[in-house]
């Protein structure tokens, strides 16, 4: 089965909130109108770390020091996603943020994420983050 390398970024602000992006509401994309982590595919000529920085800037206009957290296989109906996850912090307390993709980008407190429609199984990843990685 085809393996596709992708990145996701768990980005935290000074208030301990996590940045999520609301995907477009288009029926031809995966998880339309769902919240997700910033990220995307690793391009052929870049490393996962380079892709994480590129995706963060393209989707939000932000730059940040990112640290590799974990890598795992995420199942997809037609392929295997080789998921690389990075974490980082920014000194942006709240919006407005530059929106490069999707409908909205917003910081959320951990308890507010529980009620949101989260795409790509990232709700489980965020649960793990809140249990193990928060400082």
Image (cartoon, rainbow, N blue to C red):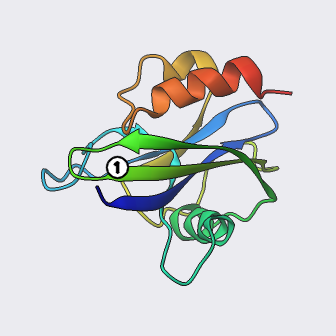
Q: Nearer the viewer, residue 133 or 91?
A: 133
x, y percent for residue 22: 40, 45
Residue under the point 60% across and 53% down: 96
**In the picture shown, does residue 70 fall above or below 117?**
below
Residue under the point 41% across and 63% down: 101
Instruction: Identify the residue at the far left of this view.
Output: 27
Instruction: Identify the residue at the far front of this view.
Output: 1
User: Mark 1 sits on what residue?
Assistant: 23
In the rendered image, the quadrant that contains the C terminus is: top right
Q: What is the quadrant of residue 57 in the picture?
A: bottom right
Residue under the point 48% across and 76% down: 43
x, y percent for residue 119: 36, 37
Q: Is residue 32 visible?
A: yes
Instruction: Identify the residue at the far bottom of this view.
Output: 45
x, y percent for residue 75: 34, 40
Label 1, residues with CA under 10 Å away: few <14, some 14-19, many ≥20: many
Residue under the point 48% across and 52% down: 82
The reply, left or right, for residue 66 in relation to residue 19 is right
Secondary structure beneath label 1: loop
The reply, left or right, for residue 100 in relation to residue 28 is right
Q: What is the quadrant of residue 33 in the picture?
A: top left
């Amino acid at each position: 089965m085809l393996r596709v390398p992708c990145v996701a970024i768990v980005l935290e602000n000074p208030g301990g909130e996590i940045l999520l992006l609301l995907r477009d509401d288009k029926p031809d994309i995966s998880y339309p109108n769902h919240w997700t982590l910033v990220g995307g595919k690793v391009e052929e000529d870049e490393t996962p770390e380079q892709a994480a920085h590129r995706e963060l800037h393209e989707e939000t206009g932000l730059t940040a020091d990112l640290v590799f957290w974990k890598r795992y296989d995420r199942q997809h109906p037609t392929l295997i996603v080789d998921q690389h996850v990075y974490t980082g912090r920014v000194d942006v307390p709240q919006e407005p943020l530059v929106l490069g993709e999707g409908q909205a980008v917003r910081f959320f407190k951990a308890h507010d994420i529980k009620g949101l429609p989260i795409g790509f199984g990232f709700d489980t990843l965020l649960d793990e983050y809140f249990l193990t990685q928060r400082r």
